[in-house]
Amino acid sequence: MIPFSSLIGLEECKLALVLSIIDPRIGGVLISGPKGTGKSSLVRSLYSILPDVNYVENCQFHCNPYNSALLCSECLEKRQKGDLNIKSKQISVITLPLGATEDRVIGSLDIEKIIGAGIEALSPGILALANQEILYIDEINLLPDHLVDTILDCAASGWNIVERENISVRHPSQFILIGTMNPEEGDLRPQLLDRLSLFAQAGNIHDLNDRIKIIELNLQQENKELLFSRFKDTDEKIKSRIKNARLILEDVILTKNHKTVIANLCMALKVDGFRGDIVLARASRAKAAYDARKEVSFNDILDCAFLALLHRTREGGMREPPSRIEISKLFSEIIEALKK
């Protein structure tokens, strides 16, 4: 593990991750790039900037005590009795192994225990551990489609449902989904790609000085204490900005003009559906909050458009996703038209 701020040449990837932490409702993040470009290292480095989260003590799902709509049955009962003990801890990164079985992911029911004791006995899976955490899937494009579908459905609803032998048990599972992939090893289906809200590319670095810095950073990992002390203040500042952004997020204003620009941009690009509009709006608000501003700027929208729209299907999948040049050109035209 290395400090978050020490990684070089991954600024858009960092921004996508930070925005998703500020507002988990944005949805998942997909980071794509060739092997050896620091994708996994970046995700592992998140622990140095992750904020704290509140949870119910002794709950196997770490329920959010302040969201009654996403409490397990036991916590709901405790809440009604006024018996919830609240604790806090830093958000964790839960890694889903590539070869994980369906039972390992969604959990399983102990049928013998149900029959013998007459109770619903759930053996929690990774989706239970991931509640209020970050769920990380490396090489997400190699994960079986049915598991990806299940995880994305769970991420959208906030609930995981385990069904066996006509018995159904559900538990809260609200997490930030982060996936990384090497496009040389295969693509995600367009339907799944569209549901991962933000997309960033980790590319090769061609600047000589930056490549020298990467070599030096790797050599410094032999002395972890010195490395972390060097970047501690920078990481703490990022962590503090994220914490503050989460506090002011709901107060950030997205004006009618901002909404008009977002809607016009998505229409001009002929992006399929409305997910692009919604993600771009949420990401722009999170970007403003991260900069400690309570109103979105047009620059926020453009910065976030590259994350929210570069992977979107268009005209029913008949056209390739938009390019940076196309997004920039249409954005400028929309802003100029708005000024007239």
Image: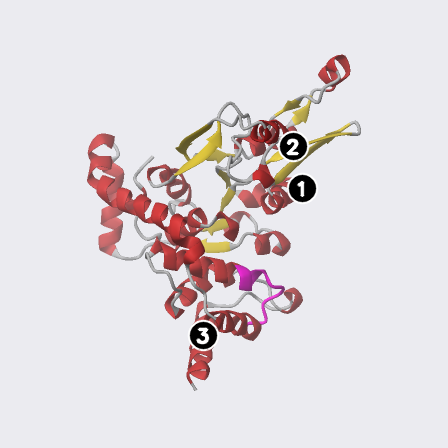
Q: Are marks 1 and 2 in contact (CB under 8 Å)?
A: yes
Q: Secondary structure at mark 2?
A: helix
Q: Is residue 29 above or below residue 232?
A: below
Regarding residue 188, the answer to whether it shows in the image is: yes
Q: Is residue 290 above or below residue 106?
A: below
x and y percent of residue 171 in the render? 62, 33
Q: CA distance from mark 3 to mark 2?
A: 43 Å
| Magenta stretch in the rendered image | 269-278
**Which mark is nearer the camera, 3 or 2?**
3
Q: Is residue 271 magenta?
A: yes
Q: Amino acid at mark 3?
A: Phe
Q: Find disc 3 in the rendering and name its residue.
A: 331
Q: Earlier in the sequence, mark 1 or mark 3?
A: 1
Q: Nearer the viewer, residue 73 or 113?
A: 73
Q: Quadrant of the C terminus?
A: bottom left
Q: Are marks 3 and 2 in contact (CB under 8 Å)?
A: no
Q: Secondary structure at mark 1?
A: helix
Q: Amino acid at mark 2?
A: Glu
Q: Nearer the viewer, residue 336 or 312?
A: 336
Q: Find disc 2 in the rendering and name its residue.
A: 102
Q: Find disc 1 in the rendering and name its residue.
A: 146
Residue found at the very far right of the displayed protein: 166
Q: Which mark is residue 320?
A: none
Regarding residue 202, the answer to whether it shows in the image is: no
Q: Is residue 154 above or below residue 274?
A: above
Q: Is residue 37 above or below residue 99?
A: below
Quarter where residue 216 is shown: top left
Q: CA distance from mark 1 to mark 2?
A: 9 Å
